[in-house]
């Protein structure tokens, strides 16, 4: 056998091994393929209280940063490193610690004689009665 023939045999065997290896690493069916996870579904299981309100406000104000934070949170949840529920206050403080102040709408309501009034309505009543 010549050197060229030996090289050809080696090359064929190498290609066969490579083909077998590729077949083993590729998923064989749709059921075996890792399915895409919806980040909102994962977060919905862990968010409580006003966490969604904070996240939606952050998405409106800092979309790129929030997208990255959501990816990291989902990754940590799926890896089991986050096991407890996430409240709105905790999520808000996370953004603050990262240097992003999320502005949330603030409302002050007053209950008077069984009716809920905004602070603005209460002040108008007080000034019109004087």
Image (spheres, rainbow, N blue to C red):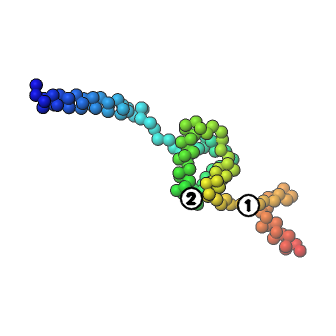
* In the depicted structure, whether residue 113 falls above or below residue 75: below
Residue 52 seen in render = yes
Q: Nearer the viewer, mark 1 or mark 2?
A: 2
The residue indicated by pointer 1 is 107
| Residue 9 percent across, percent down from the top left | 17, 28
The residue indicated by pointer 2 is 62
Q: Secondary structure at mark 1?
A: loop
| Residue 36 percent across, percent down from the top left | 47, 41
Position of the C terminus by quadrant: bottom right
Look at 67% across and 59% down and name the residue there: 104
* In the depicted structure, whether residue 72 falls above or below residue 24: below
Left or right, residue 50 beside residue 112: left
Classify mark 2: residues with Cα within 10 Å, few (<14), some (14-19) or many (20+): some
Q: Residue furthest front?
A: 3
| Residue 107 percent across, percent down from the top left | 73, 60
Position of the N terminus by quadrant: top left
Look at 68% across and 60% down and name the residue there: 105
Q: Residue furthest right?
A: 130
Look at 67% across and 52% down and name the residue there: 93
Classify mark 1: residues with Cα within 10 Å, few (<14), some (14-19) or many (20+): few
For marks 1 and 2, the one nearer the N-term is 2
Name the quadrant containing residue 85: top right
Left or right, residue 82 beside residue 31: right
Look at 79% across and 61% down and name the residue there: 117
Name the quadrant containing residue 60: bottom right
């Amino acid at each position: 056998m010549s050197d060229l023939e030996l090289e050809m045999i080696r090359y064929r065997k190498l290609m066969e091994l490579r083909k077998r290896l590729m077949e083993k690493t590729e998923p064989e069916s749709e059921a075996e393929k890792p399915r895409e996870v919806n980040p909102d579904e994962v977060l919905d299981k862990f968010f409580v209280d006003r966490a969604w309100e904070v996240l939606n406000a952050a998405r409106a104000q800092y979309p790129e940063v929030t997208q990255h934070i959501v990816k990291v949170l989902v990754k940590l949840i799926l890896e089991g490193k986050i096991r407890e529920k996430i409240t709105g206050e905790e999520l808000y403080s996370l953004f603050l610690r990262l240097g992003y102040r999320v502005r949330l709408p603030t409302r002050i309501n007053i209950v008077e004689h069984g009716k809920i009034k905004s602070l603005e309505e209460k002040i108008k009543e007080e000034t019109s009665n004087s």
